């Protein structure tokens, strides 16, 4: 990684603004309820960076977005429950600011001593955050001497608390560097993007191919095989001239699918059978059919057992695997088999020495639900950010950080 990290700077006696990803699930969306954090994985993931900075004599100002508030009046998205939770996992007092920026926040930040921790309000309470507003970026930068970005999941967005503040801190002579979580993400995903060990296999799933055409195209430059599952497989099956019944198919993307099939040759591995049903329903009766024999009145909702065997074969001997997107409608247990079995298969690959990276989002949720999270080499905390990185895009939050 060619970006500086917290190890490259002196933080002793400094005030450090840390952009964390504390976008955690909460117990209620009703502001009248007592709201608590129901899954603190993301808070715990930031602890190595926070403890390192505190142990090295810094005072911390933490900022994050939380949910999708329209305005600061959406108090159910206040960071206060997150600050309270952080206090227990960090084992030291944590102060909660009354706003993102402003007079009170400036005074609270100015009064911080080494070892103190202040959490700012939800950055999206400020209308400037998503606009990457220069004034907000400057106000955030004025609170601190240095900036640390540990929020990989937000790095694909050029917002005030990501790109804007990094530039504003640099403009006043301060450093803007990556935290340990960001470093870990960039090292795992960066290897997949720039110099993956071969054989390198990508597994793509999810609903739509239109979102992922660029991604598949870019992966064809590096991956030896791309295995396709989920709803997006249907469009390829149709592009091959087969019946797809009432399955989700993107008519607009058929030409692109044809082009990718031609470009990829036998490097694109499609399902050979599907689990189909009459309706899109959790209790719909399921039946397994060959991929070229989907009945006209049925829809493919999962990949079938023969596809899993084909995928298993394609994964034999792989040195690196990246997986993004479910193999079927995994929200319905009856159609989650393909996704769960693939997770099992990948866990077994890790035991064989394959580096398996889970690209966040639904695949990460499925792996965690199956109790296999510990077994994978790396699970990304940023679904959108990891996809954009694999597409070959520059992530503004990362590009803005100091080069080594
Ligand atoms: P994405 O956000 O593109 O990763 O898509 C994830 C969604 O794709 C999940 O909500 C799945 O239910 C859905 N999905 C996966 N396979 C299918 C399928 N065969 N038909 C319809 N939806 C699917």
Image (cartoon, rainbow, N blue to C red):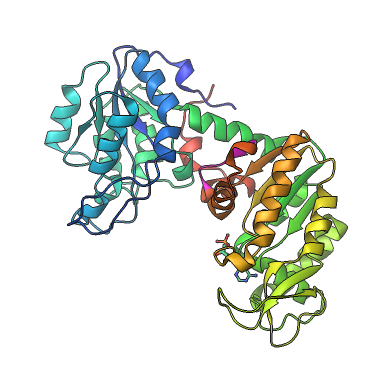
Q: Return the residue nearer the eye: 382 or 273.
A: 273
Residue 282 seen in the current view: yes
In the image, 132 versus 368, the foreground residue is 368
Q: Position of residue 82 (x, y in %)?
A: 29, 40
Q: Which residue appears at 69% of the width and 40% of the height? A: 356
Q: Nearer the viewer, residue 273 or 206?
A: 273
Q: Does residue 288 belong to the magenta stretch? A: no
Quadrant containing the C terminus is top right
Magenta highlight: main SS:
loop
Within the displayed image, which quadrant is ligand 1 positioned in? bottom right
Residues 112 and 338: in front is 338
Residue appearing at x 37%, y 50% in the figure: 25
Residue 401's spot in the image, x, y percent?
Answer: 46, 30
Q: Which residues are magenta?
A: 376-382
Q: In the displayed structure, does residue 14 sit left or right of residue 189?
A: left
- In terms of image quadrants, where is residue 108? top left
Q: Position of residue 309 (x, y in %)?
A: 82, 57
Please state the horizontal and vertical placement of residue 376, each as a whole percent of the image.
64, 39
When asked about the image quadrant of residue 341, the answer is bottom right
**For the point 24% across and 54% down, which residue is it?**
76
Q: Is residue 377 left or right of residue 228?
A: left
Q: Is residue 345 above or below residue 198?
A: below
Quarter of image, res 285: bottom right
Which quadrant is the N terminus positioned in? top right
State whether residue 216 is above or below residue 192: below
How many numbered marks, from 0 up?
Answer: 0
Residue 176 visible in this rendered orientation of the protein: no
Q: Is residue 356 left or right of residue 147?
A: right
């Amino acid at each position: 990684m060619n970006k500086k990290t917290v190890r490259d700077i002196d933080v002793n006696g400094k005030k450090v603004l840390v952009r964390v990803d504390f976008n955690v699930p909460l117990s209620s969306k009703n502001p009248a309820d007592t709201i608590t954090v129901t899954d603190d994985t993301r808070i715990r993931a930031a602890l190595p960076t926070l403890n390192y900075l505190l142990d090295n004599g810094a005072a911390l100002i933490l900022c994050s977005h939380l949910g999708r508030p329209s305005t600061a009046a959406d108090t159910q998205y206040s960071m206060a429950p997150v600050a309270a939770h952080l206090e227990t996992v960090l084992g030291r007092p944590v102060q909660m600011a009354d706003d993102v920026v402003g007079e009170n926040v400036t005074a609270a930040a100015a009064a911080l001593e080494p070892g103190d921790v202040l959490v700012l309000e939800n950055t999206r309470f400020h209308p400037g955050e998503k606009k990457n507003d220069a004034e907000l970026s400057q106000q955030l930068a004025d609170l601190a001497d240095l900036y640390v970005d540990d929020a990989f999941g937000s790095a694909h967005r050029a917002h005030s608390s990501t790109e804007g503040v990094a530039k504003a801190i640099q403009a006043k002579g301060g450093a803007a560097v990556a935290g340990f979580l960001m470093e870990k993400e960039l090292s795992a995903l960066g290897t997949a993007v720039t110099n993956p060990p071969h054989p390198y296999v990508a597994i793509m799933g999810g609903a739509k191919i239109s979102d992922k055409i660029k991604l598949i195209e870019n992966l064809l430059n590096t991956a030896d095989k791309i295995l396709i599952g989920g709803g997006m497989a249907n469009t390829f099956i149709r592009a091959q001239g087969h019946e797809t019944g009432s399955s989700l198919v993107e008519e607009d993307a058929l030409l692109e699918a044809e082009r990718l099939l031609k470009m990829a040759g036998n490097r694109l591995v499609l399902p050979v059978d599907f689990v189909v049903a009459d309706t899109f329903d959790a209790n719909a009766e399921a039946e397994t059919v060959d991929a070229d024999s989907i009945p006209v009145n049925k829809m493919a909702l999962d990949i079938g057992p023969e596809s899993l065997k084909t995928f298993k074969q394609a994964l034999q001997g792989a040195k690196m695997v990246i997986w993004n997107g479910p193999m079927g409608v995994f929200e319905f247990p009856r159609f989650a088999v393909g996704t769960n079995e693939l997770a099992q298969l990948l866990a077994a690959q890790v035991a064989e020495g394959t580096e398996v990276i889970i690209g966040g989002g639904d695949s990460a949720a499925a792996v965690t639900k199956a109790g296999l999270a510990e077994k994978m080499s790396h699970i990304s905390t940023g679904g959108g950010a990891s996809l954009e990185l694999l597409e070959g895009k520059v992530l503004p939050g990362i590009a803005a950080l100091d080069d080594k």
